[in-house]
Every structure is written in structure tokens, then in C-alpha cells.
Amino acid sequence: MTKEIIETVWNYDNSYARLPNIFFKRTNPTSVRSPKVAIFNEPLATSLGLNIEALRSENGTAVFAGNKIPEGASPLAQAYAGHQFGHFTMLGDGRAVLLGEQVTPNGERFDIQLKGPGRTPYSRGGDGRAALGPMLREYIISEAMHGLGIPTTRSLAVVSTGEPVIRETDLPGAILTRVAASHLRVGTFQYAARWGSEEELRELADYAIKRHYPEIEDDENRYLSFLQEVIKRQAMLIAKWQLVGFIHGVMNTDNMTISGETIDYGPCAFMDTYDPATVFSSIDREGRYAYGNQPNIGVWNLARLAESLLPLLHEDQEQAVTLAQDKLSDFAGLFESNWLEGMRAKLGLFNEDEKDKPLIRDLLEMMQKHRADYTNTFRALTFDKPEETILQGTTEFTQWHKRWEERLGRQDESVDASKKLMRNSNPAVIPRNHRVEEALEAANNGDYSVMERLIEVLSNPYANSPEQIDYTTLPAPSPRPYRTFCGT
Ligand code: AMP
Ligand code: MG
């Protein structure tokens, strides 16, 4: 099927398409009836070096809808495999098409991918489509993550297609334009290891190194360095998730990037009441991807990456395993040091003290016992408003607060400096589930203003501005726990 190619404002390159052809299948998006822009990310477009006016034109919308192909693009669906809830499966982009890589004026390279553009050679039984609600949800939460300073794929636009998608009921269809450092996943390497030759696996690894870790290209064993760097970035990323209470919900190996960006916003949600066992996803019945289990799953997934890389690590299999295990064993320490550093900042601490760990642990245990809100507890500490946490009035909290103040006294920095550090480390606002739902409901009824206000508030979560106060309140108690569903 040929498609109209239009001249646009993009500056595409297609390095992924130059990989061996087992890694993708060329495919075009399927045109949709009457696309309309639901939301467009101007600041992101600007930072990509794109022309706002051109993207706002009919041709711009046609590109976001998959109705026209921008000049220079080379649409394809990527091959990958993955462990889903622990079970190995052949997957691939069943409802995504990579248009190409936008090279920005300062030379950075970003994948531009349409999510929900119709069937691809990897669609299996699916329709390759996406519904408006889940695509707007991805937009809101990924942009909120960006605002929080957490590495993430981003959202450039959502267009409604004017066509229904058939799920349990008919839903309005939509396409999200996703921007990513790349879409290379742990699952891409699993695919290469299982179905490719050693040479193809090596080409993929060299490609990933060049794209994300060029500084290790000349290392003696660059594949081992590569494994180490991915482990480092994932340890840092998952620590950042834990620090803000983000629960990914579906940490399958195909949803873990090589770049260290958060990807695939399906059933994710932010924890309110502090509890390590928190699960929102309706399909995660055993809590595999519960909040407190995310670091364990992180290293489990990285072990799948390590396994896939074994033939490149050493010609002797046994030695390759030893090398890989050695790197994997660093994860726990790396995670903990990132997490501790972040927790210290959340409590206004600049230096290190061996009693910091119990101090933090006791606060978290108190939160869990009294079912305190995670974000608002840190907010109350930041703004000296203990009355705003339900912990206030308990003897435990009074004693803990005293210990904390004493600890703050054992550093050279001023109280003001501490407070500033806390303000920059504790978000005033997170995308609270009831707020996200409210925005999506309004959007489904054609009113995007509620969502636009929410996105605005979430874009600068550390500001603690007056208009944010409204967004810090908790939902009314509900007899049923909040549930999320995979974005299909
Ligand atoms: P996800 O849950 O988004 O990570 O998707 C897991 C796998 O299912 C990926 O290979 C997707 O491409 C595929 N998939 C999800 N939804 C659809 C759909 N509506 N049509 C075809 N493939 C899909
Ligand atoms: Mg996925």
C-alpha cells in the first residue's frame, strides 16, 4: 500500500532501519476517517526543533493520524520478544509504527512513533488500534513524569480518529505520537538472542552502544560495560519511581528500555496511602509488579538482558555467566544508594549518617501503619505543617520528629537550605488517580479543558503554587480500591 508523502518540518533519519532486517518489518499506518487533534505538546515540539505552525496545519494532523507520511520517514514495526508476567512470548509492535528518528538542531536523536495506527505484521489477533482514554492517560502521566524529572518517553500529540475501537463497548479511537530516546528494550535483545545469529545480536548491541552509551565504545569488553551501564540506569530509574510512589504496573521485559527511560504507560498509577504491597493493575493478581517489588523485578529483567548478551560477554560460556552475575550483583547496592540519596534529600539531609536508614524506615513504617498518604506526608514535613498529616498527635510521630530535628542539626547547612532541598525533592502534586479520571471523563465528553489544567499543574510539580493546592487533596473514601487496566 503506497501512501502520500508530504514535505514537512521533520528532519528524519532512519538508523534503526539500517539494522539487519530480522529486527523490523516495513509497514504503513492505516488511514483513519476524520482525525482531530485532542492535545498537542508545543514545548516538546519546539525542543525537537519542529515548526509549531506546520504541525498545527491539516498536514501536521494527517501525519499524527498516520494518513500521510512525512518526507524522510521510513515507517516500520519493530520486532521484539519479552517475558510477560514471567512467561516468554514473541511480541513485536502490534499497534505501533516507528516513523523514524527526528534529529534535533543540536544533534540529538529521538524516535517518533505512532501508537494505535492500525494492524502491523506483529498484530496477532489485535486490531492495532488504541482508545482515546488510555492514550490521553499516557500523555498525562508521561508528561507528569517528565515534570518530576524522571527519565521517560514523552507524548507529542494525541489525535482522535473519528472511528470507534471495539473493546467491551465501542470506544472513541485515538493515536498517540510517542517520543523516545529509542524503543530498544530488554525484549529486543531477547528476540535477537533467540532468533538472530550471533552476528545479528552483536550488530544490535553495537547499535545500542552507539546510540545510548557512546562513551564505552572503546572499552576492552564493551558488551560487559554495556550491561553495566544499563544496570546503572535502571537502578537509578527505579529508585526515582520509588521516591515519588510511581507504580509501573506492567514491568514485563518488553516494557523495560535500554536507554533507561520509563516506557509503556498502561496500568501505571501513583500510590497514595503508603503500602509496599500496593497494586493497581486489575491483571496483576499476585502482586508481581507491586510497588515494593519493583526493584526485585528490575534486577530479574536485567538478568534476562544479561542472559541474552552471554555470547558476546566471553567465548567461554561459564566465564560469561560469571561476568554477568558479577554485574547483576551490583544492582542492589546501586539501587539502594540512589534511593538513600533521594530519601535524604526528601528529608532535607545533605550529609550521610549511618542512622539515616532506620530514620527513613521508621517514617515509612509509621506511614504504613497509620495509612498515611505518601506524597502529602513529605509535603507536610517540607512545609512544617504536621497538622496536615494523620500521623500528627501520635507519640511515635512526636518522637520521630524529634529524632529528625536532631539529625538536621548534625549538618552544617542552614535550615533554609534544608527546606529548599526538600521543596525540590518532594512534589506538591502528583497525577492523583481521581484527578486523572476526572480529566479523562471530561475529555471523553469532548471537554479537554480539565485535562489541560491538570497537565499545566503537573508540569512544575515542585512549585507548590496556589493553584496546585486544590490538586493535593485526597479523593473521597471509596468502598472499592482504584483499579487500572492495560491500555488496549
Ligand atoms: P503492551 O501491553 O502495550 O506492552 O503490549 C503488549 C503486546 O501486545 C505488544 O506486542 C503490543 O504491540 C501488543 N498489543 C497491545 N494492544 C494491541 C492491539 N490493540 N492490537 C495489536 N497488538 C496489540
Ligand atoms: Mg509494551
Image: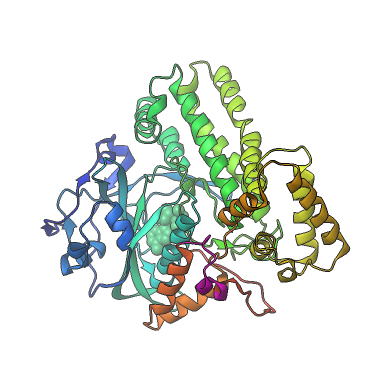
Left or right for 250, reference 408: left
Could you tell me residue 157's position as x and y percent?
32, 64
Q: Say above or below: 282 vs 300.
A: below
Left or right for 69, reference 193: left
Asked if residue 118 shows in the view, the reply is no
Q: Say above or below: 134 vs 99.
A: below
Report which quarter residue 163 is drawn in.
bottom left
Q: Say above or below: 149 vs 130.
A: above
Q: Quick one: quadrant of the N terminus?
A: bottom left
Kindly identify the residue that appears in the image at 28 percent across and 46 percent down. Answer: 25
Depth check: 266 or 417 in front?
Answer: 417
Left or right for 477, reference 218: right
What segment carries the magenta color? Answer: 460-470
Report which quarter residue 393 is drawn in.
bottom right
Depth check: 403 or 160 in front?
Answer: 403
Report which quarter residue 381 is drawn in.
bottom right
User: Ligand 1 is found in which quarter of the picture?
Assistant: bottom left
Kindly identify the residue that appears in the image at 41 percent across and 44 percent down. Answer: 80
Return the residue found at the far bottom: 445
Kindly identify the residue that appears in the image at 40 percent across and 42 percent down. Answer: 184
Left or right for 220, reference 100: right
Could you tell me residue 56's position as x and y percent?
21, 67
Return the residue found at the far right: 395
Q: Say above or below: 169 vs 91.
A: below
Q: Quick one: quadrant of the C terminus?
A: bottom left
Total numbered labels: 0
Depth check: 12 or 381 in front?
Answer: 381
Could you tell me residue 19's position as x and y percent?
28, 35
Please tell me whether residue 230 belongs to the stretch shown in magenta. no
Could you tell me residue 250's position as x and y percent?
54, 55
